[in-house]
Image: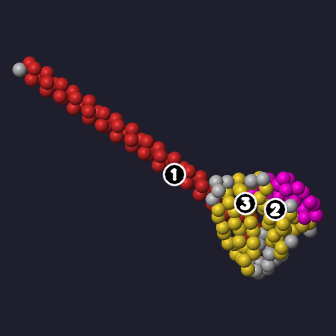
Amino acid sequence: MYKSRENQHMIDILFVLSLFCVFAVSSVVIILFGAHIYRSTVSQMDDNYTARTSIAYITEKIRQADEKNAIEIRNENGHQILMMTTMIDNTAYATSLYEYDGWLYELFARTDIELPLDAGQPIMEIQELTFSQISPRLLSVSFVDGTGDSTSLYISTHSNTEVSHE
């Protein structure tokens, strides 16, 4: 009778230990799975943030400069530059957007002053940036962001003018 209780007690202990091990392994698997999902979600959110921020930034700059004969696409030193001119106190100023050294740059300066490309302010990492005019009121902007994802967008101008090319 004593051995029977000892065997039953041993079986109870083994059952509890095996149940605990199953619980522990399940917990670790669920934690690892959750960590993987979290990492991939954060990565996707970062990629979306970068793309959407770039799109919103460029679109807003073009919308701010949407006046007759204010937007111009230039090529300087092998770089395509979107120049948006505005008048402040009878002086012409230009906001220029361009890719330089792997970054989207913005340069705000008087139009009668020539500054080097590195004089601008780096805004965000971007590998490639191109501008083209599709129709008199439609601009195309294409870029490759820092992660290598390419994005294209079309921006309709309301000023009813063609973008000049120089």
Please name whichever residue, 30 or 63, is drawn nearer the observer in this view of the structure.
30
Residue linked to disc 2: 79
CA–CA distance in space, label 3 to label 2: 10 Å
**Considering the image in quadrants, where does the C terminus appear?**
bottom right
CA–CA distance in space, label 2 to label 1: 35 Å
Residue type indicated by callout 3: Glu
> Residue at the spot x=9%, y=23% of the render?
4
Please, which residue is most extreme toward the left here? Answer: 1
Residue type indicated by callout 1: Thr
> Residue at the spot x=51%, y=47% of the render?
39
Q: Quadrant of residue 82?
A: bottom right
Contact? badges 1 and 3 (CB < 8 Å): no
Marked residue nearer the N-terminal end (3 or 2): 2
> Residue at the spot x=85%, y=56% of the render?
117
Residue 106 in magenta? yes
Give the side of residue 159 with respect to residue 146, left or right: right
- Report if residue 96 is visible in the image: no
Contact? badges 2 and 1 (CB < 8 Å): no
Contact? badges 3 and 2 (CB < 8 Å): no
Picture disc at residue 128: 3
Marked residue nearer the N-terminal end (2 or 1): 1
Give the side of residue 29 with respect to residue 82, left or right: left
**Considering the image in quadrants, where does the N terminus appear?**
top left
Please name whichever residue, 103 or 162, is drawn nearer the observer in this view of the structure.
103
Residue linked to disc 1: 41
- Helix, strand or loop for disc 2: strand
- Helix, strand or loop for disc 1: helix
Residue 159 in magenta? no
Residue range corresponding to the magenta coloring: 104-121
Marked residue nearer the N-terminal end (1 or 3): 1
